[in-house]
Image (cartoon, helix red, strand yellow):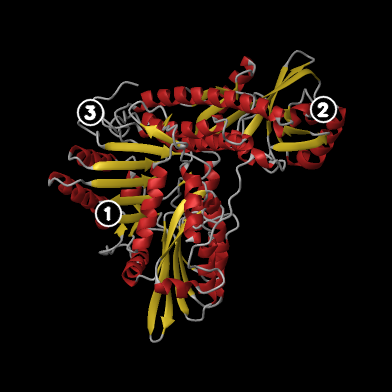
Amino acid sequence: MTKPDPTENRYINREISWLQFNARVLQEATDESVPLIERLRFLGIFSNNLDEFFKVRYATVKRIVEAGKGGKNELGGIKAKELLEIITKIVIDQQAESIRVLDEIDKALKDENIFVINESEIDDKQKEFIKDYYFQNISTALVTIILNDLVVLPNLKDSAAYLAVKMQMNDGSKQFALVEIPKTVDRFVVLPRRGDKNFIIMVDDLLRYCLGDIFNIFDYKSISAHMIKITRDGELDFDSDLSKSFIEKISDSVKHREVGEPVRFVYDKTIDVDTLEYLMEKMGIDNTDSIIPGGRYHNKRDYMGFPSLGIKHLLYDKISALPVKGLSLETSIFEAIAAKDYMLHTPYHTFSYVVKFLREAALDPKVKTIKITIYRLAQISHVASSLINAAINGKTVTVSIELRARFDEEANIYYAQQMKKEGVNLIFGVPGLKVHSKMCVIEREEGKKLKRYGFISTGNFNESTAKIYTDYTLFTSNQPILKEVNKIFNFFEANYRVYQYKHLIVSPHYTKKAFFKLIDEQIKLSKSGDQGYIRLKMNSLSSYDMVDKLYEASNAGVQIDMIVRGLCCLIPGIKGMSENIKVISVVDKFLEHPRVYMFGKDENVKIYISSADWMTRNIENRVEVSCPIYNEGIKQEIIDNFNICWSDNVKARLINTENENEYRVDDNFKVRSQIALYDYYLEKLKN
């Protein structure tokens, strides 16, 4: 890629940048230093990410094309139709690389005596096991669709995998069918061991072996099966029926997503031409859809659940989540945070402190109210159970729950219904805005006054993701801050009122203005002869306004160091535009999720943790909260964390004009930041 002319192109297109981020995930699957089964799981994450990309981003660009619009201004200088072609080309190349990586991993598994076999490689004992497994576990769950010219093809489920079956009949005719691979059964079937050898067969191949049982009523002379998958537009569409509750509308929309417009069709490239043409005609696939030839297997996201077989050296070493010094799960958290602020950094620290805080609030007779925002709940949520427990105990519990948390709506809907039954006051966001802030405030009667306690976080209150996402949660009894948190809940109840905030930075009303002011302070410092300094850590940067402001700061001489895990529309290192900006991305065992914004240095540094990335949606279309850090010890901890991450030369990639995901390398001293951070917290406990 040639270096962009600052006068012509100031941004990296967000879709292309996102695909480059997913390429970094695929790099982890390629990396031979990553344990073998973890490499397979990264392959699954890559595939799952790609599914979501097509459901959301590709679908959005496709809508622009279908509306007859160019979309050049919105898409960073590329016309929408051209962008669809670029995306498809990139994805085809990435899919080809993922197939190559899978073949490479398969060979390496054989060296470990793990054999992933197909239907042509099974022996007599395995045949007996497979037949029994099919009839006992799969046959009753199987959905088989017989196709002919008179039958309208039912809508294929979004991201489900199907075997496209072709039977060459004895009378010379052809019969086509589809077999849906059930999501209710494990994708990988572990077969009986043979000595020290482990055998695994994918359900796809198990079904191929059992085709004769599935289609035993048909008189055919040959039968073949190839996999296909369709991805549908993932946007939620709401009806205007006033008689339906908001929960009902969301539930209906989630169901409707299963039959949304197709945006991607993936097929086994060895499929017979007549089968492919027949299916595409039946499904109404056209040239605005992304049509991608693939390998024998789709839904590689299932590799996230590849069986470990109890072989420890093929997995990452598990870490034991550490305690936070000064906080105890055996004593009152309220008493601890009444004295000082504490910070939880998952998964290095245990998420149990969040649940303990809520359980303590649920039981404490002095606690009168609990208010919390919920964005993504775990399938089994102790957070939700604690809130229900509090309501049963007579507390006034208010939960702002976001039912439009993309692809996690079902868990949220389930728990919203449970909480509603127990008298929890539910708030379903704000019209036109998603509530993405992560905060909780409780009011506790102490003497004749109510005192507030609470926490503000960069991550979701989700026990499952807390084990694999790095996030900060600040526990505090700072009354001015918690008073402002309470104001935000008042805004939820009466959103025609816009409140003023002295401490918190709140979207959609103040985020851009507040961060512009903080950047301007550093610009002023640089122009006066001092050194302006900005350090930023986030998931994504796509707001052109924020990018332009950082370019302005760079041109004023402000040093800007950025850690951006995902998409980044800013082009660093361009003379006259961004020469003072450096950007890295760290992709490793844990998903880097905190948003941290630091302005200035030494004793003058201002630090915020935030729920908001610097994306237009976070700044203008969501309720987000950025919280200042006032405790000097926590400030230093966050600076130390940033410096450790910034020094990574094992899992850090350079984001540059070439956009090639080049690793940052230092042969003299290796720093893998996620390992170094765990060691940092171990050392803090010792000291």
Query: Who's the residue at 38% across and 26% down the image?
Result: 83
Give the residue drawn at x 51%, y 31%.
27
Q: Amino acid at mark 1?
A: Asp
Q: CA distance from mark 3 to mark 2?
A: 66 Å
Residue 493 drawn above or below residue 262? below
Which numbered disc flags the more N-terminal residue, 1 or 3? 3
Marking on residue 6: 3
Residue 520 at x, y percent in the picture = 19, 49
Q: Is residue 256 left or right of residue 532?
A: right
| 39, 50: nearer the viewer | 39
Callout 1: helix, strand or loop? helix
Residue 195 x %, y %: 83, 33
Residue lying furthest top: 172
Q: Are marks 3 and 2 in contact (CB under 8 Å)?
A: no
Choose mark 1 or mark 3, whichever is in front: 1
Q: Identify which residue is drawn at 43% across, 26% down.
A: 87
